[in-house]
Image (tube, rainbow, N blue to C red):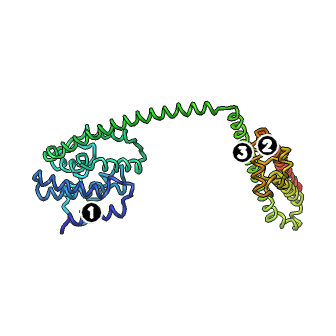
Amino acid sequence: MDILKISEDYVKNLFKDRLSSAYTYHNLDHTIQVVDKIKILAKEESIGPEDTENLLLAGWFHDLGYIDDADNHEEESRKEAANFLKQYGFPEDRIAKIGELILATDKFYKPKNHLEEIIKDADLYHLASDDYFRICENLRQEIKEVHHQKFSKQQWSELNIVFFSKHQFYTKFAKENWQPIKEKNVDKILSHIQNLKEEKKKKAAEDNDKALLNKKKLEKLESPERGIETMFRVTLNNHTKLSQIADSKANILLSVNAIIISIALSSLIPKLDAPSNSHLIIPTFVMVIFSVICIILAIMSTRPKVSSGTFTRKEIEEKKVNLLFFGNFYKMPMEEYLWAMKEMMNDRQYLYDTMIKDLYYLGVVLNRKYKLLRLTYTVFTIGIIVSVVAFVMAFRNVTV
């Protein structure tokens, strides 16, 4: 039985089927790289066949825990390896050793023996890889997608320098062959950081120049009209929100009273023809009448009023038409409306007068809506009180 081949196929299938695509670093490619480096180190460090097999099995399983729990992946990987190897009757003492090797891949763990040093060096081989910058960028993207932590290129490079300063290779082969490449990568990162800082300074200077230029342009463009336009925009927005609030309140009253009427029609009124329920006739009709009045008032508060939808050129020339209200132009041909709008835009006084009239009439409509709403709420309140009193009196008379 080739346990290494069986384990390799098992791990590859799990990674392909279950690992999220967000893991752009801790994935099958990384695992294969670690296994390859374990083979090299085991050979160069003269490791025996059994220990080599233990190392390779630990290499295949060491990141499998990312499938279920990224924050505790070493422990999950150890459990996954133990459960799998037990199925094939693997010795318990070797399973325990493989589990310890997997736990040794924790980035803060300091190896305690030669085998742990080998898997530790293999796991962090990418620090001495010629393809380091691509691999490192994959790790940055993974942290962004999985842990929702964003780092700028400069921040990421500085974090890597800190990590490099704390890292060391443990095996003789890694120190002799990988350490020099790692040091070259450090120099490249430092150079990259310096370039980023210079680019940042250059961009800051350019942004400052642009800001000064824009400020000068704005100073030239600044005029009283800007404040006036802001005032119109804010006021129109407030009018619109108040209108929406009024319509929402009216809809609430419509819904509540419709429910009251539907309950009365379905539950109370069919029972009124019985002599024993005759005392409920007056209270029921009082409640229904008040609800109907509330519905009528709520409908009146939301009922739109549309004007003729036409205008004449003479009215435009005399500045009598508000072209900002759709009810004054919706029946006009497009050409006539375009002409009228251009006439209004070319005459600043006409434009401002129109905007003022638009706000005024919106205010008039809002006043009507809120007056009707206030009346509706008053009727609704009185209706509820009168209905409750009527029902109480009716039940009291029956009891007496």
- Mark 2 or mark 3: whose residue is earlier in sequence: 3
* Mark 1–mark 2 distance (CA, rounded to whole Å): 80 Å
For label 3, the SS is helix
In the picture, residue 204 is in which quadrant? top left
- In percent of width and height, residue 97 lies at 20, 54
- In percent of width and height, residue 274 lies at 87, 67
Mark 3, Cα crowd under 10 Å, few <14 / some 14-19 / many 20+, is few
Marker disc for residue 195: none
To which residue does mark 1 refer?
A: 84
Judging depth in this view, the residue of 216 and 243 nearest the camera is: 216
Specify whether residue 385 is in view: no
- Relative to 221, 139 lies left or right: left
Give the residue type that dot 1 points to. Answer: Phe
Judging depth in this view, the residue of 79 and 246 nearest the camera is: 246
State which quarter of the image contains the C terminus.
Answer: bottom right
Give the residue type that dot 2 points to. Answer: Thr
Give the residue type that dot 3 points to. Answer: Lys
Q: Look at the numbered discs 1 and 2 and tell me whether their residues touch, using CB distance below 8 Å.
A: no
To which residue does mark 2 refer?
A: 354
Mark 2, Cα crowd under 10 Å, few <14 / some 14-19 / many 20+, is many
Residue at left offset 77%, top offset 41%? 347
* Mark 1–mark 3 distance (CA, rounded to whole Å): 64 Å
Q: Look at the numbered discs 1 and 3 and tell me whether their residues touch, using CB distance below 8 Å.
A: no
